[in-house]
Image: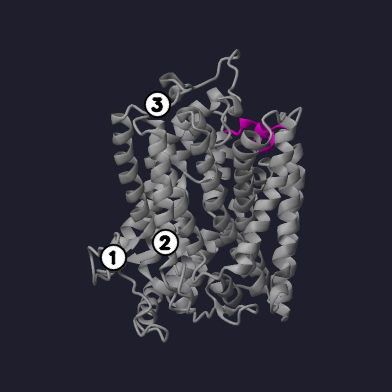
Amino acid sequence: MTGAQVVQLVVFLLLFVAVAVMGFMASRWRRADDLEHLDEWGLGGRKFGTWVTWFLLGGDLYTAYTFVAIPALLFSSGALGFYAVPYTIIAFPLVMLPLLRLWSVSRVHGYVTPADFVRGRYDSPLLALAVAVTGIVATMPYIALQLAGLEAVLRTIGLNGTGFWGHAPLFVAFVVLAAYTYQSGLRAPALIAVVKDVLIYVVIIVAIIYLPAKLGGWGAIVDAGAAKLATPSPATGQPAGSTLLTANNQLQYATLALGSALALFLYPHSITGVLSSASRGTIRRNMTALPAYSFLLALLALLGYVAIAAGTKPIVNGSTGRPDSNTIVPALFAGQFPPWFAGVAFAAIGVGALVPAAIMSIAAANLWTRNIYKEYLRRDATPADEAKQAKLASLVVKVGAVLFIVVVDPQFSVDLQLIGGVIILQTLPSVAIALYTRWFHRWALLAGWAVGLLWGMIMLYGIPNPVNGKQHFGGSALALGKLDLFGWLPFEGSRVQIYVGAVALIGNLVVAVVVTLILRATRTAPGIDRTTSDDYHATRVPEDTKPDVVSSV
């Protein structure tokens, strides 16, 4: 380890430890009489106001994905990486009204998870189970993405061992994250998110002013990016990418942006942040203000081109012996900033990974507790039993994410999020559409979910990764020429690419519509809807309202 890396490590550890201490102290912040309740541990008492919610949702949605994955994608592929900018701009106005309806109906009935809502809306424990399991599975790679970002920082600092023990620093960070999440619940990431956002804004403002001035301006940076991306890749013989979209990836770009926008607030952690809000007005104000983060995201994405102009090289992963593209931005900061400020930047990335990882694990734990444990294993569980079970489940989810990092080696860490998006998109008809209409039959939704999920996994499995030689799960972009409909190739020979999640969702909806028509024609019982139209517009809950107990819905 060099002298510069020692300075970076010391600064990183000081800030990291300070944030961890805040996480443990958060249990006393806005403390309730009894934290042993899922509403308190998993939703922060449903009391967060506009500012806390803004930081919480920002910390929840703008993550290591923002600081590590997107710039790495621009560094390697070019313009395609900018899909993240329009998708966040599209997402907030697109989802504002559905989230208001979800907040209201959840507050009236005491729903903690999206699967709670599905259980009450469709009188189907099996459909609720499908939504819960899907949410947990989709969240795992997203948590893994955060840990990949943290590991990239540790690797850049010099903690880059070989073999299994090369992941040892990540295990230490995992223990810290698990401990303060277990103790403080959602209050921990809500409090830490404020520090995380301050650090990120400071780092990015310095970066976008200091680095272009040092490297000859944005014109020279973009030119350097265009020249490098036009160079044929040794692995494929084709240009690695371009600063402009091509005929083959324009459809992929559009479907990625739209599909990601639709998926964003289907994720359990996004819904957890929304349900913790104190009022509908809080959500409205946040959907108006959160696009400010999209501007930040665009600036961060450009760091991929800055790294090219600076001649930054990815650090070789000591465990695999291959260059780790996730280290591009940390390596850029290490090479261009003074060591002390590089340490600050590394802390921003590290904290930016831990905040969403904590929220995600809490959201997954809520799903397990409410929709699996209480529904199927212990119907008479008390609120204290639920809180204890959620704490334990949050630990298991984090362990699963760590194993995901150790076992899976995606080409880009952004693939972890995109694969999760393919999975969570299959809950859109059951959750988002159900907020407006109950036309779909519950069994049809289940059939559509199963087809969409299975088809999506088959398509993902068939996508090779030419960079590392793997033949499966090499990304989320499918060439239309490979689209197989029971042996029929409608676009045979086409090299135009499309996001797998969009294709799987279309299949899901087609099956749901057809099966609904069949079941309606045969007069199959649709189940009882426990919600009313007024529930979706409630601004407050009367004192005499008794929230539903999900297991008895």
Residue 157: % across, % down = 67, 73
Residue 480: % across, % down = 28, 65
In this rendering, the answer to whether 344 lies above or below 43 is below
Residue receiving disc 2: 458
Q: CA distance from mark 1 to mark 3?
A: 39 Å
Q: Secondary structure at mark 1?
A: helix
Quarter location, residue 219: bottom left
In this rendering, the answer to whether 430 lies above or below 340 is above
Q: Residues within 10 Å of mark 1 (few under 14, many from 20)?
A: some
Residue located 57% across and 72% down the image: 327
Spot the residue most to the front.
Answer: 522
Mark 1 and mark 2 in contact? Answer it, CB < 8 Å: no
Quarter location, residue 100: top left
First in sequence, mark 2 or 3: give its number: 2
How many marks the image carries: the answer is 3
Q: Amino acid at mark 2?
A: Ile
Label at residue 525: 3
Q: Amino acid at mark 3?
A: Ala
* Picture quarter with the N terminus: bottom right
Residue located 53% across and 62% down the image: 67
Q: Residues within 10 Å of mark 3 (few under 14, many from 20)?
A: few
Residue located 47% across and 59% down the image: 419
| Residue depth check, mark 2 versus mark 3: number of the one nearer the observer | 3
Residue receiving disc 1: 480
208 to the left or right of 59: left
Q: Secondary structure at mark 2?
A: helix
Residue 253: % across, % down = 33, 61
